[in-house]
Image (cartoon, helix red, strand yellow):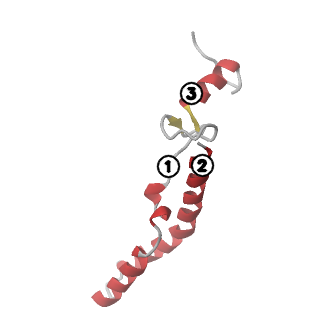
Amino acid sequence: MKNLIIKDRKNRVKNKNLELKTLYFKTELRNKKLTLKQKDKIIFTNLKSSNQAKKIRVRNRCIVTGRGRGVYSSFKISRIPLRKMLSEGGITGFRKNN
């Protein structure tokens, strides 16, 4: 599971680096003064960017286990270790109801 966490971190860094670049491409494509040939060139250069860097590839994962499902975004922990921490009293301000 650690490799999934590392892979997700790499994807987040790549996405952050390319976010500004893709925003620039989108604004350039909205420019009505450009010719179709210039727009095609912009699209082609944007398509060459890595698929791993796309925003859709970034997934919320548990920072403890690397699990991709059932992750609470406020804690960044999946439901299984969160339940364990709550029952042990690891998170202040919460208690488990029986």
**Label 2 residue SS:** helix
Q: How far apart in space, not on screen, are marks 1 and 3 (Cα)?
A: 18 Å
- Of residues 50 and 55, the one drawn nearer to the viewer in this rendering: 50
Q: Is residue 31 above or below residue 61?
A: below
Q: How far apart in space, not on screen, are marks 2 and 1 (Cα)?
A: 14 Å
Left or right? Give the position of 38 relative to 71. Answer: left
Q: Quadrant of the C terminus?
A: top right
List the residue tagged with mark 1: 59
Q: Position of residue 76 (x, y in %)?
A: 59, 40
- Mark 3 vs mark 2: which is more N-terminal? 2
**Residue 3 visible in the shown view:** yes
List the residue tagged with mark 2: 3
Q: Position of residue 68 (x, y in %)?
A: 50, 41
Amino acid carrying label 2: it is: Asn
Amino acid carrying label 3: it is: Ile
Left or right? Give the position of 5 relative to 92. Answer: left
Q: Quadrant of the N terminus?
A: top right
Q: Quadrant of residue 75?
A: top right
Residue at screen point 62% across, 45% down: 2
Q: Is residue 22 above or below residue 60?
A: below
Q: How far apart in space, not on screen, are marks 3 and 2 (Cα)?
A: 20 Å
- Of residues 69 and 90, the one drawn nearer to the viewer in this rendering: 69
Q: Position of residue 78 (x, y in %)?
A: 55, 34
Q: Is residue 59 above or below residue 67?
A: below
Within-10-Å neighbours for mark 1: few <14, some 14–19, many 20+: some
Which mark, by number, is residue 85? none
**Residue 35 visible in the shown view:** no
Within-10-Å neighbours for mark 2: few <14, some 14–19, many 20+: few
Within-10-Å neighbours for mark 3: few <14, some 14–19, many 20+: few
Residue at screen point 52% across, 45% down: 60
Which mark, by number, is residue 80? 3
